[in-house]
Amino acid sequence: MDINKSEFSISSATLQQCPNDTKPEYAFIGRSNVGKSSLINMLTNHKGLAKTSATPGKTLLINHFIINNEWYLVDLPGYGYAKRSKTMQQKLERLINAYILNREQLVNVFALIDVRLEPQKKDLEFIEWLGESSIPFSIIFTKADKLGAVKAKQNVGSYMEKLKETWEELPPYFLTSSEKRTGREEVLDYIEKINKELKK
């Protein structure tokens, strides 16, 4: 898929404020500091589209970006950021849950995982919840360049082994690096394939 046009559409503090539109939506979510903004900018070829920040946990709203006037890339707040107040964490959790469970236009959630880390309880619980809620999702492993190709693949392998303990069928997954633009075509082709199926 070629991305010729990507632009910010709207930031929403509630589900009701999200675009009144029927175009398919692909949501990106992960723990704070997983490299979500860098990944979004790499995928869209648009350096400043999603605001990257040195401080994790900056995304507090649902951000919609319209791509090629055909579909939305949705940047969801990160989870598991310890420095937020309990009230703020609960508020964000409600916002994320409301969007993922009730947004009819949502066709796939990309769950972002830092490939350098051992399987984290928060990530595993989130993936488990997506499965239990029958939400179509895929995993994007980020920051592959920080490890080297062999080690990154090994980590992905052991992650999938961990998932096999509870999953009969493993979700699709992608290994990416925003620095080296690894995995860009694979992720975009996957989105394009789903879009074509939806048009049928």
Image (tube, rainbow, N blue to C red):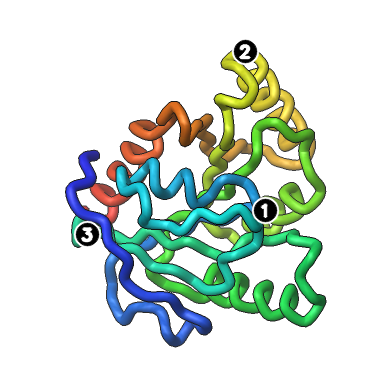
Marks 2/1: CA distance?
Answer: 24 Å
Q: In percent of the image, x 56 and y 42: which residue is there?
A: 139
The location of residue 149, given as percent across then percent down, is 57, 16
Q: In percent of the image, x 28 and y 51: which residue is there?
A: 195
Q: Please, what is the three-letter code of the amino acid marked with disc 3?
A: Glu
What label sits on residue 180 in the rendered view? none
SS at mark 2?
Answer: helix
Q: Nearer the viewer, residue 33 or 110?
A: 33
The location of residue 158, given as percent across then percent down, is 73, 25
The location of residue 187, given as percent across then percent down, is 40, 38
What label sits on residue 31 in the rendered view? 1
Q: Earlier in the sequence, mark 2 or mark 1?
A: 1
- Residue under label 2: 150
> Taking 93 as reference, is 158 above or below it?
above
Marks 3/2: CA distance?
Answer: 36 Å
SS at mark 1?
Answer: loop
Query: Is residue 174 shown left or right of residue 116?
Result: left
Q: In percent of the image, x 46 and y 55: which residue is there?
A: 108
> Taking 124 as reference, is 76 above or below it?
below
What label sits on residue 70 in the rendered view? 3
Marks 3/1: CA distance?
Answer: 28 Å
Q: Please, what is the three-letter code of the amino acid marked with disc 2?
A: Val
User: Is residue 24 in view?
Assistant: no
Q: Outermost residue toward the front?
A: 54
> Taking 199 as reference, is 178 above or below it?
above
Q: Please, what is the three-letter code of the amino acid marked with disc 1?
A: Arg
- Label 3 crowd bin: few (<14), some (14–19), many (20+), radius 10 Å: few
